[in-house]
């Protein structure tokens, strides 16, 4: 890791409370690397060799079984993956690939586990990070189990509108294949859901969505802080195993 990258990394919440000596030890073994779009970073079932920190860009976490594949989460700056597997020295439960050109910090798993045991500030930050991941997983589970697909899409659009400054036109951050999977839908069901929301002022043009009747959409969606939280980005409430 280059010396001019140090202040950026040092200021991340996960590393802010570390002792200087611990940070210097970690920085001496970590490296900041750029990846183009579509690069496979980790593979489901492989040992967790590195802790990844998304500094710029975005990473899709996905899983497969029996010839099926599903997007599990999208990790956006500044967040880690997959911390729990690193701490437990366990295999990855998900694969990961870049959705766009991204910059990631890679920290060897062994040094993360060592500093977790020896640096109290770092260990508290890790516990806080994992607690946030757990709460995000509970929110996502409630969203999938308690809401219809139409309600999930409506709440996602309202969250994006909040995150993008309450504008009438919002931009979908992810391609519709990824969005459909994150919402627990097929691409065909997502298209039908968008059409169903037409009377509520939802108009789709590629990755741009116009929300001309946000009050009507909010009545349908019934957003809840106990499900949606405060963040506007779906990737913020990600599972991390």
Image: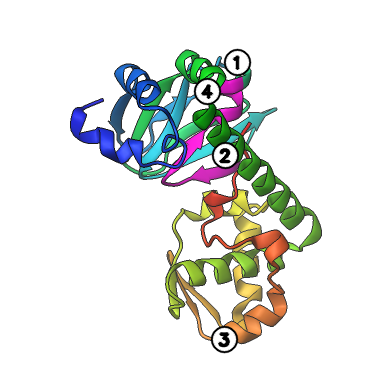
Sooner in the amino-acid sequence: mark 4 or mark 1? 4
Q: Secondary structure at mark 2?
A: helix
Give how far apart the Cα atoms at labels 4 and 1 are. Answer: 15 Å
Sooner in the amino-acid sequence: mark 2 or mark 3? 2
Residue 82 magenta-drawn?
A: yes
Label 4 belongs to which residue? 43
Q: Name above or below for residue 51 compared with residue 73.
A: above
Check whether the beta carbons of the residues at disc 3 and disc 1 lie within 8 A of each other: no
The answer to which of 143 and 128 lies nearer the viewer is: 128
Label 2 belongs to which residue? 129
Magenta stretch: give its range.
70-87
- Seen at 63% across and 26% down, the residue is 93
Give how far apart the Cα atoms at labels 4 and 2 are. Answer: 22 Å
Could you tell whether 20 is left or right of 175 in the image? left
> Which residue is situated farthest in the right direction here?
146
Could you tell whether 190 is left or right of 41 in the image? right
Label 3 belongs to which residue? 213
Could you tell whether 89 is left or right of 16 in the image? right
Check whether the beta carbons of the residues at disc 4 and disc 2 lie within 8 A of each other: no
């Amino acid at each position: 890791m280059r010396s001019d990258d140090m202040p950026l990394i040092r200021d991340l919440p996960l590393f802010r409370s570390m002792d200087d000596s611990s940070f210097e030890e970690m920085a001496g073994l970590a490296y900041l690397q750029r990846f183009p779009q579509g690069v496979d970073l980790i593979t489901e079932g492989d040992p967790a060799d590195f802790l990844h920190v998304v500094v710029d860009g975005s990473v899709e976490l996905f899983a497969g079984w029996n010839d099926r594949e599903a997007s599990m989460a999208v990790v956006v700056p500044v967040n880690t993956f997959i911390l729990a597997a690193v701490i437990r020295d366990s295999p990855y439960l998900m694969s990961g690939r870049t959705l766009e050109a991204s910059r990631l910090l890679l920290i060897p798993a062994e040094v993360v586990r060592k500093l977790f045991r020896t640096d109290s500030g770092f260990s508290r930050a890790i516990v806080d990070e994992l607690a946030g991941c757990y709460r995000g997983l509970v929110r996502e589970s409630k969203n999938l189990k308690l809401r219809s697909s139409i309600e999930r899409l409506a709440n996602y659009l309202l969250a994006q509108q909040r995150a993008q400054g309450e504008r009438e036109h919002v931009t979908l951050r992810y391609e519709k294949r990824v969005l459909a999977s994150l919402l627990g839908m097929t691409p065909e069901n997502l298209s039908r859901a968008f059409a169903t929301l037409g009377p509520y002022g939802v108009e789709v043009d590629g990755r741009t969505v116009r929300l001309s009747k946000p009050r009507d959409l909010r009545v349908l969606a019934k957003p809840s802080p106990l499900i949606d939280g405060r963040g506007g980005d779906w990737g913020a409430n990600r599972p991390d195993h």
